[in-house]
Amino acid sequence: MNRLFTLMALLLVTHFNATAQITTGRTTSRDSLSSSKMNTVDSSEILIEQRLVDLALKGPSYSASNHQNRINELELQKAKNAWLNLLSISTNYNDQSFAKNTQNANIVYPKYFFGLTIPLGVIISRGTEVKSAREVIALSVDQQKILARKIKSDVVGKYRQYKLYNGLIEIQSVLINDLLANALQAEDNFRKGKITVEAYITAQRTRNEELAKNMTLKYEQDIVRLGIEEMTGVSLEEALNPPPPPATPTK
């Protein structure tokens, strides 16, 4: 008898272990499939967001920072070369026709005099101006990096907000379909005298309120879309679905 119980217990344990392994295998397979789909969606969304950022960085806001950097570089070059404007060259002609040497000594006087005036104090101060111009360039580069990060944050944030509105509108549309059917049913029941006026009015009011909410969501989504298009310079549809690259001609 004891051997029989022991054998039955072993069979039950083996059965439960096998069932658990099968269940675990199915769960693992299901989780892997779900994770694979999620990774695919995430990668496609990352590509879309990166495309929007690239388009936004080609816009006039970021282009203006490039021009400012170029202006600052020219100002630095101007500061480096400014000391040349401080130099002055003078010449003097020595007329010796009136001079007569009463002695027999051989004395030669220079006929021309050349002079170069160098204001040392001003030239030394040029170094400070050059350093200041270099700091302006460094500041401009940092400001450009800050601008790039802000543009990225703004355009990605707007796109994610746009997707949020998509989800809200989809949920709202399902609810509206149910409320429209409910309102039609209430209207039919009211005609047949099955419900009161208050119940009929309540059904119509609920439908109209949800329709108004849906219109508001679509309006707010359009505002976000216009903000994205303002930053990227192209329509959102074009940004999300870029044209395929031209085919390479075969030889």
Image: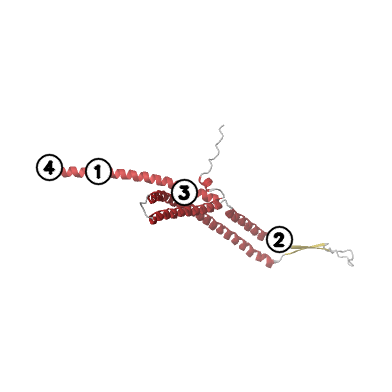
Asked which secondary structure carries label 2, the reply is helix
Q: Give the residue type that dot 3 points to.
A: Ile
Q: Callout 1, which amino acid?
A: Thr
| CA separation in Å, label 2 and label 4 | 111 Å
Q: Is residue 75 left or right of residue 175?
A: right
In this view, the residue in front, 67 or 193, is 193
State the image coordinates of residue 25 (x, y, percent, origin top left).
Answer: 30, 43
Q: How is the image coloured?
A: secondary structure
> How far apart are the alpha carbons under marks 2 and 1?
91 Å
Q: Position of residue 122 (x, y in %)?
A: 68, 66
Q: Quadrant of the C terminus?
A: top right
Query: Which residue shows up at 60% across the image and 55% down it?
Result: 64
Q: Is residue 223 left or right of residue 189?
A: right
Query: Which residue position is annotated with label 4?
Result: 4
Instruction: Evaluate if marks 2 and 1 touch, with contact meaning CB atoms under 8 Å apart.
Output: no
Asked if residue 44 can be seen in this view, the reply is yes
Q: Which residue is mark 1?
A: 19
Task: Give the numbered dot on residue 47.
Answer: none
Marks 2 and 4: CB-CB under 8 Å?
no
| Disc 4 residue type (three-letter) | Leu
Q: Which residue is mark 3?
A: 46
Provide the secondary structure element on which disc 4 rests. Answer: helix
Q: CA distance from mark 2 to mark 3?
A: 54 Å
- Foreground residue among 217 and 198: 198
Q: Amino acid at mark 2?
A: Leu
Per the model, the C-alpha gap separating discs 3 and 1 is 40 Å
- In this rendering, the label closer to the viewer, 2 or 4: 4
Crowd band around label 2 with a 10 angstrom C-alpha radius: few (<14), some (14–19), many (20+): few
